[in-house]
Image (tube, rainbow, N blue to C red):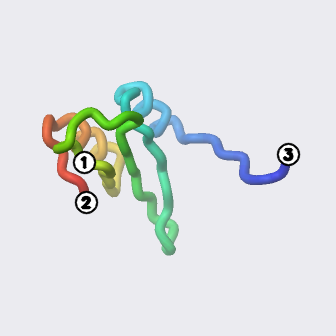
Amino acid sequence: MTGYSLHPSREVQRLRAEFPEHLICELHDERGRPVFTATRARPCCPRSPDLVTAATPVALREALGRPSAGAR
């Protein structure tokens, strides 16, 4: 099969283990800077954000740890 072979970083693997209810990815902007994203695997309530983004794994962890994390 052709295509991209994707291997998440150890930090993304740790985030996924900490927050199994979220789909977490590390993307990169046009300059190659990382952007960490998370979205709920299953919607839980109408007030929950659809997408959370952060510049660092620490910032994403903090945003997901808050009861009402705001989407950016």
Q: Nearer the viewer, residue 26 or 22?
A: 22
Which residue is the extreme one toward the bottom?
30
* Distance Cα–Cα, label 2 vs label 1: 9 Å
On residue 1, which mark appears? Answer: 3
Vertical comparison of 70 with 64: above or below: below
The x, y position of residue 13, in whole percent, is 49, 33
- N-term mark: 2 or 3: 3
**Residue to which mark 2 is pinned:** 72
Circles 3 and 1: CB atoms closer than 8 Å: no
Cα separation between marks 2 and 3: 36 Å
Quarter holding the N terminus is: top right
Q: Which mark is residue 49?
A: 1
Density class for disc 1 (Cα within 10 Å; few <14, some 14-19, many ≥20) is some
User: Most extreme residue toward the right, as rendered?
Assistant: 1
Q: Residue at x 22, y 36 (%)?
A: 45
2 sits left or right of 42 in the view? right
Residue type beneath disc 1: Pro
> Which quarter of the figure is the C terminus placed in?
bottom left
